[in-house]
Image (tube, rainbow, N blue to C red):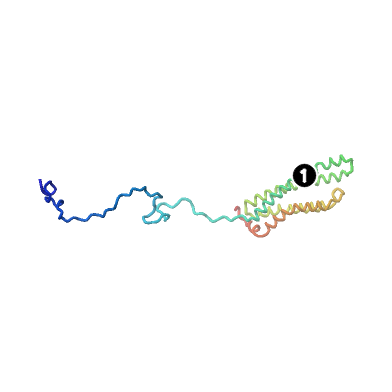
Amino acid sequence: MSGPGGWGPPGSSPWADPATPTQPGPPYPGPPPTGPPAYGPPAYGPPGQPWGAPQWGPPPYGYPPGPRRPQRPGQVVTAAVLAFAQALVVLVASLYLWFFASVAELAAAEAGGIYAPGTVDALASEGTALALVQLLSAVLLIGAGVWALNSRRRAAGVLLQTALGLQVLLAVYWAVRLNSEVGGYETEGTIAAFALFFAAGPLVGLGMLLAGPGRRWFDGTARA
């Protein structure tokens, strides 16, 4: 057989004729790549956008961050810490005072009536009453300090100032009391000076609450 598309001698088909014009094909792309595929995250978003550009899809979950809460001034924190420290000192001193007041009458009885019974009873009653007042003031210091660290109400600031001011008054009382006659005997001035030591912390705390950021912090906000 011969003719186009069939078997036959060369020249019987135009595909076998070297003189027949043909269409040029695409250029040779080269050998296929043999290396491993490139690593990295897939490119999201519209074609042509660089990595990190705004991507398609729903917006991220959550809410935008709100305004930053105001930070508690260091003066307020320091005043509260001083109140806690003062409460610990007052608790220890109150226990000692109550102990000495409890044994005062017994010691006077064993001394053979050297001390007047009325004077001993008065000193014992005074010591017991002062120990109770100091214990209550220590509780007030702790409560006021905790409230001042958790609230910006004016009442919280006033309560902490009152608790610290009460400690100053107690220290002044002890300084005057120990510098006078106690049971008919003169006391040493160094004892009165030691009593004033207990007023140092409350005075510093009051100064921090009555001036500067410590005074402006308690503006009536419920909590901060």
Q: Position of residue 32 (x, y in %)?
A: 31, 49
Q: Position of residue 64 (x, y in %)?
A: 49, 54
Disc 1 on helix, strand or loop? helix
Is the N terminus in the top left, top right, bottom left or bottom right quadrant?
top left
Residue displayed at 14% across by 48% down: 5
Q: Position of residue 165 (x, y in %)?
A: 72, 54
Q: Is residue 111 left or right of residue 141?
A: right
Q: Is residue 85 left or right of residue 26?
A: right
Please state the total of marks drawn on the protein image.
1
Identify residue for label 1.
Answer: 96
Residue displayed at 51% across by 54% down: 65
Q: Is residue 156 left or right of residue 92?
A: left
Q: Position of residue 209 (x, y in %)?
A: 67, 57
Q: From this viewpoint, which residue is outermost toward the bottom?
A: 212
Residue displayed at 81% across by 41% down: 103
Q: Is residue 12 left or right of residue 203?
A: left
| Amino acid beneath label 1 | Tyr
Q: Nearer the viewer, residue 33 or 132?
A: 33
Residue displayed at 65% across by 57% down: 214
Instruction: Give neighbour class at mark 1: few <14, some 14-19, many 20+ (Cα, 10 Å).
Output: some
